[in-house]
Structures are given as C-alpha cells and as structure tokens.
Amino acid sequence: MSIVLAYGFRPFFLLLPLAAIGAVLPLPVLWLGWGGGTSLPAGLWHGHEQIFGFLTAALAGFLLTALPSWSGGPPVTGRPLALLVGLWLLGRIGFWLDGLLPPSLVAGLDLLFLPALLLAIAPYRRPWEFAAAVILLIGANTVFHLGRLGLPTPPAEQSLHAGLNLFLILIALASGRILPVALRSALLETGQAPTVRLAPGRRHLAAATLALFALADLLAPDNPVTGWIALAAACAQADRMVELHHGPALLRPQVFLFYLAQGWMVLGLGGLGLAILAIDLDPIAIRHALGLGAATTAAVAVMSIVALRHSGRAFPLPTAIWAIMALISLAALWRIAVALWWPSSMALWGVTLPSILWATAFPLWLRCFAPWLLTPRADGQTG
Amino acid sequence: MTIPIGTAARGRALRALDYIWGGWGAAASLLLLVALWEAGHAAYGTLVLPSPRDSFVALWTMSAAGRVLPAVLETSANALGGFAAAALIGGILGAMAGASDMMRRLLQPIATLMLGIPAIAWVVLSLLWFGGTGLAVSFTVLVTTAPIVFAGSAQGVRTLDGALRRMAQAFRIPRPALVWDVYLPHMLSYLFPALATALALSWKVTVMAELLSGAGGIGDGLATARVQVDTVKAMAWVVMVVTLLLALEYLLLEPIRRHLQIWRREMPGGPPSSSGGF
C-alpha cells in the first residue's frame, strides 16, 4: 500500500490545493467578461467550489484522521480511502468541466462524495456532532443542485451560506479539541507552565450562538433579528479569543492561526450584523471575511497541525506558515476592502490580486508539508 | 522555572484585561436579548414594543437635544443622595446592633418592619410629607435601602472573630491598624454585598419615585412618554436606565467585588486567576 493512502489526511491534504486553486483560477477571466462557458453565475460556481470542494476536502482529511485517533477505531486506509479521494476528485472534475457536461451529470458526480464520507465516518460513534454536520452539508449541497436542475428551492446563495455557516460551527467544534494541544505546545516553547484550563462554557456559547446564527441566516436572511444574532455571535467569538491570551505563547504560529481565524470570524459576523441593521455594506464582500478569512485560516491551522502531529513530528511548525497565513489574510483584506471602498476597480484589484495571493499560498503550503505527506512517519510508527 | 520580576503587577494587568475582555461575553448575551426584543417588535408592532433601533435612535435624538444628560444627572443625584444617607445611617445603626445585644433587640424589629413596607407606600408618604421634590425621592431611597445596609452591617460586626481581636491586642496592634486590617476587611465581606444590593435598588426606587412625583429625572421622562403614549420614547428611557445599571454593576461593583475576594482566588490550591470575565 502506498504511503499516501496510509492515513486519511495524506491524500486529501495533498490534493486539496488543486481544488483551492481551481476554485479561483477562472474568476479573473469571468470578471473581465471574457469567458462564461458555465451556466452558473461565476460567484455561485466559485462559492460552491470553495465550500464543497476545498473546505470539504479539508474537513474530510481532518475527520478521517481525528475521528480514528480520538475513538481508537481502525482508520480508513488503502482502497476505501482511494475510493473516497476518487469520488471527491470526480466531483471537482465535474465542476471544472461544467458547461461541457450537462448539469445533472455535474450534480450526480458532486453529490457522491459527502454521503460516502458519512458512511466512512459512521463507525466512529463519538463525537456525533461532526457526523451531524456532514449530514447537514449533504442537505445544503443537494438543495443547491436541485435548484440548479430547475426544482423550486431557496436561492442558491442560501445553500452556500448555509454550507459556509456549517463550516464555521465545525471550526468552533474542532478548535475546542485542537486548541488545548496547540496551546500547550506553545506554552512549552515560550517557557511557560503548560497548564491549560479552558472554560467549556465559553466555547459552547461561541458554538451555540454560531448555530443560532446559521439557523436565523437560513430561515430569515436580511431580517433584523438575524442581524442582532449575528452581532451576538460576533461578540461570543470575540469572547473566546481570551482563551489564547497567554503572552508570548499567543505569537506562536499554532496558536496565532486560531486567533487570526477567530478575529476574521468576529469581523465577518459583526460586519454581516451591521450590514443587515445599519450600514450599507456589500454582504458578499463581508462573507469573504468568514470564508476566505476565518474558514481558510482555520483550515490551514488544522491541516498544518494534523500534518505535523500525524506524521510523527513535534512542534514548532515551519516558519513559512507565517507567509502562508499572511498571503491568505492579505487576500481576504484586499477582496473585502476593494469591494467596500473601490468597487469600480473590482476586476483587477478585488478579484485578480486576491486570486494570485490565494493561488500562491497553497503551493507554498504544499512545498512545506508535501514531503511529510509523502514519506512515512518520522517516529517510525504506522499511519 | 524562574519567576520574573513584576509578576504580581503583570498578573493584575492581565486579570484586568481578562475582565474587560469578558465584556464580549456579556455583550453576546445582551445582544441575544435584543434579538428577542426585535422578534417581539416584529410580532406585536411598534405600539406595544418599538424596534430596538428606533429606541436607540430616539435615545440618541433625545441626547442630542440635551434632554438625557440632565435627567441622568438628576436621577443619579437623587439616588446617590438617598443611598449615601442610607449607607451612613444603616451602617452606623447596624454596627451598634451588631456590637450590643440590647441595641439589636431594640432595632431589629424596626428594621424588619421597614423592610416589609412596600417602596410604593413610601413614595406616597414622602410625597405627602415633602411634596414633589428631589427630597421626597431621596427620602424614599433612604428608607427603602437603609434596612438592607443595617442587616449587612449588623451581621458583619456580630461575627467579628473575638480570638483574632484578643490576639491583636496581645501583640499591641495600634487601634487604627486593628480597625483597618482586622475589623474592616471582615466587615466588608458582609457589608459590601448589602451596599451593592442597596445601590442597585436605589436607582430603581428613584426612577419609580420620580415617575410618581414628577420630580424630574428619568422617571419624569418616562411619565411624559406614558402620557403621550410614546412607546418609543418610553423604551428609550428604559434603555437609558438599564445602561446606567449595567455600567454601575460592571464598571464599579463587580471590580470592587473581585478586589475584595482576592483572598478567595489566591488561596493555596485554589483555581488560578485566569477564570476572568463577567
């Protein structure tokens, strides 16, 4: 068996940069009005690929690695893992060829992966929240495709927003489990006592307000009630940042990545709340703080820490992680700022430049981490 | 591991930061309440429950017109005047009751009786006695909150540790030091909760008394809004009162409470001080 198929994170993290770059590559062309082979509006196509292509691959790699190691069950490896990766890749190829293939075929290819992932993680009964979130993701993706095939469904944006909101909840859940490990290592690196006591109430409040926001955003988008809930969720996320205020340990990358992701979440949720309640802000731009800012930063954090730990290595993370982090946050900043303040220069500065930054970040990530993903564990264990 | 110099000061600063940062958690809770309020507005309309934004805007407009600050100052003056008198009188009488059994027998029933009289009855009586003035309001505050302070003060003095006092005397501790370092910290652990309750109550009683007496202040604004059936303005005044109460609680009382409870936090084997926040 190839080492690449020895554990879930290896193939998914190796291939995911492909989806990440694929999801932005056609954007500048589409924005400049040259292309347009696909029957989907460019924004929807891009949003779907980021959420159900890129982020979903990160989720799959994380779940297929974390769930077995938490529950002690046997991991999915070898042929079944190859099958899962293949199904994911089929969905992406379908979307890349969208416009050449009929929409029903694109939908059929794309809808194969998440149910297969659910089947693969079903044997690990605990923690159940992740499986529940995967089921909801399947629902969101199905509604997206049904709408495209002409069935009466809510607008396609709403499925994408629901998908992204689910990822925010997933990040809140996952970071509750990864953060203690990251924080402990950072405290040790900075010469502090590695005692980490995180109040569970704080992260439960953060996750619960996010879930409430996701529900409100689904049932009554643009309603003032949703606006206030978004502001409350933003405050609850900000409240959680205090968990990481540990002096110099905060500036270790494994901790700072989470801090940054949390900060983007605060900005995004707060901006959405203000956009609904008071200020005329472009909500699509604000959602980029949640997707491109928060979710991507958190995904990079999780991917990097999982790749490090499960390839049998110890902290610190490679220094290049700072560059990757900066590229992503710059891309988010640019995408949002240009849309809000210079909407006339959107095509070049608001889309092309962030796309380039984004498409630089992921090859850089591969350059750092691919050698670990392609070679056996450093400590000689299997997996 | 070496402990760097200035750890204590750093620890204090970090605790303060943790505390201030904890405001986000409180804000999350309050904003969810505002979301519920907004839903109530959507269900029942402006006449029953004006929208939060309209109320905030109304408050802003009234402030810009210069009507809020004078009212707030007047209400604060009435409340604080009554509270200060209650703290002084209740505190002294309570200390006497705590120190002497006879005084306790004499004063305790009266305090119980005073506690039992509803605040609204006091408003009516003081209106008859003092007319619709700030004095009537302050008097109402005094008589409704003094029994609370009395009870706390009496309890604090009565439970002073006699053995500790005798030890202090054996070591010839100067009297001021005895009061400051032995009596006061012990008394405060009983007196402070009573004072905090009394202070929060004094604001509510003040607004009520002002509303009924027309003696100016926030209560008067509320009364006007009621006469004009202007729910938006009424709600704006309520928002103002609530803001005052929250500021009082989180900016004044809670920090003091935390400071007084340092001994609890820094007991050996106790939880570390990082459990900050509201």
Image (cartoon, coloured by chain):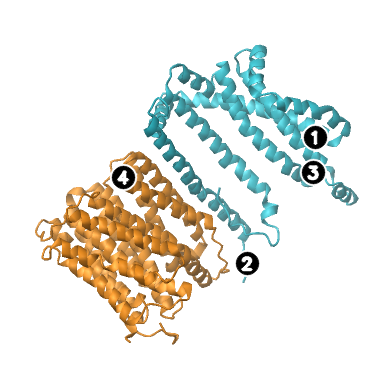
Chain colours: A orange, B cyan
| Distance between the alpha carbons at the discs numbered 1 and 2 | 44 Å
Q: Which residue is mark 2?
A: B3
Q: Nearer the viewer, mark 3 or mark 1?
A: 1
Disc 1 or 2, which lies upstream in sequence? 2
Residue position marked by numbered label 1 in the rendering: B95
Mark before the other along the chain sequence, 2 or 3: 2
Q: Amino acid at mark 4?
A: Pro
Q: Label 2 to label 3, Cα distance in Å?
A: 34 Å
Foreground label between 1 and 4:
4
- The residues tagged by marks 1 and 4 sit, at their Cα atoms, a distance apart of 60 Å
x 48%, y 32%: residue = B239
Q: Which mark is residue B183?
A: 3
Judged from the image, the secondary structure of the residue bearing numbered disc 4 is: loop
Label 3: few (<14), some (14–19) or many (≥20) C-alpha neighbours in 10 Å: some
Residue, disc 4? A221
Return the chain for callout 1.
Answer: B
| Chain identity of mark 3 | B
Quick check: can you spot residue A322? no
Nearest-to-viewer mark from 1 and 2: 1
